[in-house]
């Protein structure tokens, strides 16, 4: 069943790299927004002490997630100067290739969780 996908990435901020990470995100987020129009949500959050970064992504469907992940290797390589991946969570049904790629990341020590079945809920594209 094709439907929305929520992708959560959790990372540790490397010692002494918080400001550099902030600068990287400030430069990179507008470019990502322009380059990935099918990504509905891209919301990074820092822990109170600035040691953990969590990013929430939402996609309308598997093809949208696939489009977002095009070029992710290069983006991730640049980000790894500032962060170490702790875990990935995928809620929904990504394409087989994307799911397989995510599962491969566990070989780096990152944890991977997948909950494929949604059974309700809604997305409200506007407020009010």
Image: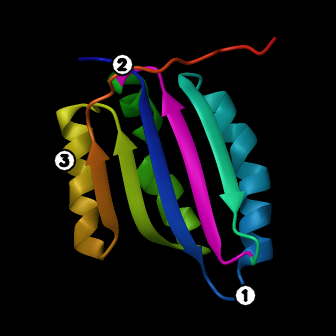
Q: Residue at x 20, y 38 (%)?
A: 97
Residue picked out by circle 1: 16
Q: Residue furthest front?
A: 120
Residue picked out by circle 2: 3
Extent of the magenta region: 50-61
Give the CA distance from mark 3 to mark 1: 33 Å
Q: Residue furthest bottom?
A: 15
Left/right of residue 45 with respect to residue 54 in the rendered view: right
Element at badge 1?
Answer: loop
Q: Mark 3–mark 1 contact, CB under 8 Å? A: no
Left/right of residue 35 with respect to residue 58 in the rendered view: right
Residue 13 in the image: state x and y as whole percent: 62, 76
Residue 42, visible in the rendered structure: yes
The prevailing secondary structure element of the residues shown in magenta is strand
Residue picked out by circle 3: 100
Give the CA distance from mark 2 to mark 3: 18 Å
Element at badge 2?
Answer: loop
Report if residue 92 lies within the magenta region. no
Say which label, 1 or 2, has the lower sequence index: 2
Image quadrant holding the N terminus, namely: top left
């Amino acid at each position: 069943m094709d439907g929305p996908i929520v992708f959560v990435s959790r990372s540790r901020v490397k010692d002494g790299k918080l400001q550099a990470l902030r600068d990287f995100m400030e430069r990179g987020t507008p470019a990502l927004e322009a380059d990935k129009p099918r990504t509905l949500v891209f919301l990074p959050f820092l822990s109170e002490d600035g040691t953990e970064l969590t990013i929430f992504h939402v996609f309308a469907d598997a093809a949208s997630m696939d489009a977002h992940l095009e070029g992710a290797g290069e983006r991730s390589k640049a980000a790894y100067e500032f962060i170490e991946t702790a875990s990935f969570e995928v809620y929904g049904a990504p394409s087989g290739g994307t799911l397989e790629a995510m599962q491969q990341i566990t070989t780096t020590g990152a944890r991977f969780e997948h909950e494929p079945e949604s059974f309700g809920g809604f997305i409200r594209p506007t407020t009010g």
